[in-house]
Amino acid sequence: MSAPAKAVRDATRWALAAVLVAAGIGHLTTLRRGFRIAVPDWATRLLRTDKDTIVVVSGVVEIMLGAALLLLPGDRRRVGLAVAAFFVAVLPGNVHQWRTGRDAPLLDTDARRFARLFLQPVMIAWAVWSTRP
């Protein structure tokens, strides 16, 4: 891989890590209520817990994944695949939020909630591409 291509891939991985850490912090602080809206009722039954716990745990996982992208270079590929799997795992929450029409920060219209669904595959591809060997 050329040096400029490596620099771009490294920069996108750092950006992804920043997005994950920022979102994770949001799960634990000011955006917590909004994230609870995206948790489907079936998830609480399946996991035998409440929506707030799901939001908090997913926030902690996001922070850990973001940190791992930067701090575990030897496991970069596995971490990237774990990030992609995480993005797949939260997709049902995005679908739930769109179908129920519930507002959350930055997702306050049907069009925005619908557009968010198309961002998820981009995030998955970002995680996979930015951590390729």
Image (spheres, rainbow, N blue to C red):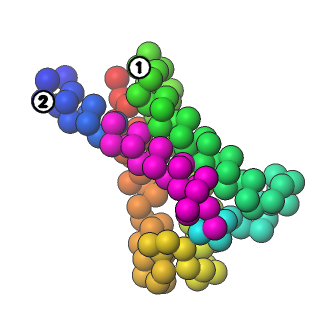
Name the residue carrying label 1.
Answer: 73
Q: Is residue 90 left or right of residue 130?
A: right
Tell me the magenta residue range. Answer: 14-33
Q: Is residue 72 left or right of residue 2?
A: right
Name the residue carrying label 2.
Answer: 4
Does residue 82 appear in this view?
no
Mark identifier at residue 19? none
Q: Residue 69: x, y in percent?
A: 44, 31
- Which residue is at 20% across, 36% downward? 8
Q: Label the magenta part by its dominant secondary structure.
A: helix
Does residue 75 appear in this view?
yes
Q: CA distance from mark 2 to mark 1?
A: 19 Å
Q: Amino acid at mark 2?
A: Pro
Query: Dot 2, how many residues are within 10 Å of its Cα: few (below 14), some (14-19), or many (20+)?
Result: few
Q: Quadrant of the C terminus?
A: top left
Q: Give whichever of discs 2 and 1 has the lower sequence position.
A: 2
